[in-house]
Amino acid sequence: MTTDTTTAVTSRAEYCVIACAEAWRDNGEVLASPMGLIPSFGARLAKHTFSPDLLLTDGEALLVGLDGRPEGWLPYRRHLTMVTGGRRHVMMGASQIDRYGNQNISCIGDWEQPTRQLLGVRGAPANTLNNPVSYWIPKHSTRVFVERVDMICGVGYDHAVGPYHRLPRVVTDLAVLDFETPDHAMRLVSVHPGVTVDEVRAATGFDLVTGEDVPCTREPTAAELRLIREVIDPRGLRNREVRA
Amino acid sequence: MNRRTEKRAERPDKVLTPEDVVGRLRSGMTIGIGGWGARRKPMALVRALLRSEISDLTVISYGGPDVGLLAAAGRIRRLVAPFVTLDSVPLEPHYRAARERGAFELTELDEAMFMWGLHAAANRLPFLPVRAGLGSDVMRVNPGLRTVTSPYEDGEEFVAAPALRMDAALVHLNRADRLGNGQYLGPDPYFDDLFCEAADTAYVSCEQMVESFAPDTVPQTLLVSRHSVTGVVETPNGAHFTSCVPDHDRDEPFQKLYATTPWPEFAERFLSGKSEGDYQAAVQAWHKEQRK
């Protein structure tokens, strides 16, 4: 990985890193909680560049700087208080997600006796009522983007309660989406270069709100590309999570 | 009378064997298991449970292979959990298989609801209010959950997370003394202190028993206090194959074997012995084979 680190064309995975990083722009001094490889690269990129105040964890119980040095203690009991205190922006995965952002990671099929047992609700119910929750979907398809989720774990806008519910964005291997519509139905914000609007529509199991001109996800700067390729992910793991 | 006074002066020794602990448990009990996912689980005590006939359990756990083992062996009547995972292997295969054949009942709670349920139980409260669950299907699949409205001017509605009271708690720590004081040396206490306080009886297994803690012991590491502990067991490598840092990391190759081996085969090779020692010997033999 010593040659072409700045001249090679931007890969799909790199647009995804950029789109994830943008979720944490202007977030201030909050914990960035990325679930998955590309979101964690995005969080690190954001902290390296436009959101230096972000807090990051080592995946266990330490708050760490970009150099890995500890700056705080965050065992699960305090992590849960960070959630309910709202000082956190998590990017979760989703086995299913619907047009209002209801998310499922618990099971597929009938909850009583599922056809596929998955993780369980984990912290999704508390997350969605307390701190901003974005989503990362590495394979945008009609299996994930469904009309109705089988088990509501993360709460969508049509079920939202309380003063703190907010779902800033959904990033996929094809596009960036959000809920900035009058009834909070999912909207196509941008497509990654090389992806068409029709491809995104075809991979989505419900009608997406789509404007007349859908822009492309922004290009990384040369400095951002260098950071991704040389500092954050020199082994190129991003291109294994998202190919093309 | 004299003898009794002497015994008191010595202070009660709570040292037990894994078999002693299981001898105090009964079928039908509600048992809490400490740790988190595949991290610092009291696996030696779970294995002792598997060697017994005890069944029909209600298990309360931030679930890992403790749940997978008990579910595969058919010992669980009801599970109370927000998830079951092996961390490095996201989905627990034996738990999945049990759920997909409808082997037991499930109380599926959010992680925070679960934590406040432990706090409620430890504080002898029937519930604590949480901003979690409303709007989600946690309410649909737990029709017994109730809500409370803030009596103050905000008037917000919350879920009343019910106390997770248990008959017995099993936790694993790095060190403990003979009186039941337990010390963790890793980065995260998880919720082991709360499990002990939420239970009528609590059993601490530890990597190493100490006569006493050194005068320069970091006070915050003394997580579990003897007033909340019934018995203490020394089980070196007792969290295996989950992590118990800094004493040992998760045994990833062995966990992978556990996750990919059909249950009868795994149980026959590793769990059919008569003691924890037999298990540890079987694991060592397997590792030796791998090195060849």
Image: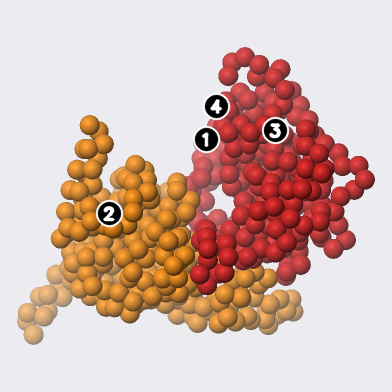
Chain colours: A red, B orange
Left or right: where A73 falls relative to A185: left
Q: Amino acid at mark 2?
A: Glu
Q: Which residue is mark 1?
A: A68
User: What is the chain identity of the residue bearing mark 3?
Assistant: A
Q: Amino acid at mark 4?
A: Arg
Q: Amino acid at mark 1?
A: Gly
User: Which image quadrant is residue B36 in?
Assistant: bottom left
Query: Please, what secondary structure does the residue beneath circle 3 have?
Result: helix
Q: Position of residue B259 (x, y in %)?
A: 38, 50
Label 4 and label 2 in one chain: no
User: What is the chain identity of the residue bearing mark 1?
Assistant: A
Residue A174's disc number: none
The answer to whether mark 4 and mark 2 are in CB contact below 8 A is no
* Alpha carbon distance from label 4 to label 3: 16 Å
Q: Position of residue B274 (x, y in %)?
A: 15, 60
The label nearer to you, 3 versus 2, is 2
Q: Which residue is mark 4?
A: A235
The label nearer to you, 4 versus 1, is 4
Q: Position of residue A217 (x, y in %)?
A: 79, 37
Query: Please, what secondary structure does the residue beneath circle 4 have?
Result: loop
User: What is the chain identity of the residue bearing mark 2?
Assistant: B
The label nearer to you, 1 versus 3, is 3
Q: Position of residue B224 (x, y in %)?
A: 35, 63
- Residue at 90% over, 48% down: A211
* Alpha carbon distance from label 1 to label 3: 28 Å
Residue A12's disc number: 3
Q: Residue furthest right?
A: A212
Q: Which residue is mark 2?
A: B265
Label 4 and label 3 in one chain: yes
Quarter of the figure that contains the C terminus of chain B: top left
Residue A11 or residue B14, whichever sits in front: A11
Query: Please, what secondary structure does the residue beneath circle 1 have?
Result: loop
